[in-house]
Amino acid sequence: MELKNVLLIGGSGFVGGWIASCLSQRGVRVTIATRHRDNTKKLIMLPTVDMVEANVHDAGALVALMQDQDAVINLVGVLHDNDSRLPYGKGFAAAHVDLPRTIVGAMKQSGVRRLLHMSALNAAINGPSEYLCSKGEGEAVVRGAMDELDVTVFRPSVIFGPDDVFLNVFARLLKLFPVFPLGGGSARFQPVFVGDVAKAFCDSLTDRSTFAQTYELCGPKVYTLRELVEYTAQLLGKPRRIIDLGNGGWAYLQAGLLWLLPRPPMSPDNLRSMEVDSVTDGSHNYPGWQPTPLEAVAPTYLSPKEIGQLRLDRYRFRAGR
Ligand SMILES: NC(=O)c1ccc[n+]([C@@H]2O[C@H](COP(=O)([O-])OP(=O)(O)OC[C@H]3O[C@@H](n4cnc5c(N)ncnc54)[C@H](OP(=O)(O)O)[C@@H]3O)[C@@H](O)[C@H]2O)c1
């Protein structure tokens, strides 16, 4: 199966940048649909990647964007929604449920068959949080289209890499506070490297054996949230006293206060998502899956020593030494 043109929806973000870069290296022409062209500035240097400002919630606009495309990748996701209600607020509904429905409809209308859909580990219609419920409903929507479209669904645990909004957020907070109150510290995660996620997406585009399949994308090792925060502090060279707030009232009080910040690092809904461990039993791994250890990558963007060394290496390289 040959593939020349891919439409990336939600491609201006953390994961989107890696997928766009991976596809670009393979000579695929990528169109990133974004609500704000400014969001895509960091991708402007990638050859074969174009940015188009569009309202992706508008079915007509999507059909127009899908002309001459061979595949669509949907990465749109939001972590917070101010309109909190059951089963989920309007923001989660728009991004995780209504948009996949509009994308599926536009694909059927425009005749593009291949769809990669980004969900999340533990997404389920009856999940413990608005995020997971709405992601589950979105998955159900794209699965419902499997008889007419060639769909692959990806369910990652938390994703790490330079520019992640996970370890970097903890790093920011750890630098500010000598004592670190932590809610949900016993929640378990299997962090996966963004480069591995991008590779799985790019490989699967043309691999027919992945059509109509759902894959869980996880790293090689399980950590508690507390272990991850401690590891981040160790890499920063800033040992911190961590105060365990448990999983109950104090943790929710803290999450509620953090949620009021302009770019909230945590919300009560995030805490509810952590009620289920974000780990896999390996039965839904991507074919040939060989995930990169956290310890091989995190120091390169968190440890001041390694960052300094990398900068030095770059100067040496430029100076031809
Ligand atoms: N990062 C993780 O640890 C993680 C873990 C599991 C699953 N995921 C899922 O992976 C996907 C990508 O994550 P990410 O970390 O790359 O997210 P990100 O950096 O926040 O990027 C999200 C993208 O979604 C678009 N977007 C956000 N809200 C939108 C809305 N209401 N309507 C239309 N577009 C909207 C944004 O595009 P514009 O602003 O340019 O329009 C942006 O490009 C998401 O679906 C996320 O739920 C991520």
Image: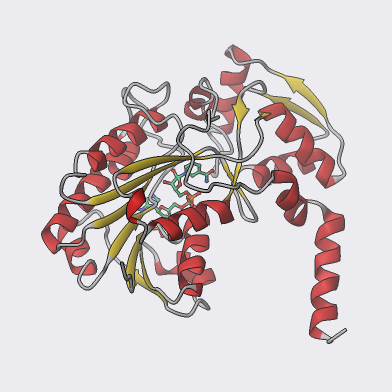
Q: Quadrant of the C terminus?
A: bottom right
Extreme-top residue of the structure:
249
Q: Foreground residue, 91 or 278?
A: 278
Residue 117: horizontal and vertical position, in percent? 35, 48
Q: Is residue 43 left or right of residue 204?
A: right
Q: Is residue 202 left or right of residue 320?
A: left
Q: Residue at x 32, y 41 (%)?
A: 96
The number of callouts visible is 0
Residue 302: horizontal and vertical position, in percent? 76, 51
- The picture quadrant where one finds residue 245 is top right
Q: Quadrant of the N terminus?
A: bottom left
Q: Foreground residue, 27 or 63?
A: 27
Q: Residue at x 51, y 73 (%)?
A: 25
Q: Foreground residue, 236 or 81?
A: 236
What's the colour scheme?
secondary structure
- The picture quadrant where one finds residue 52 is bottom left
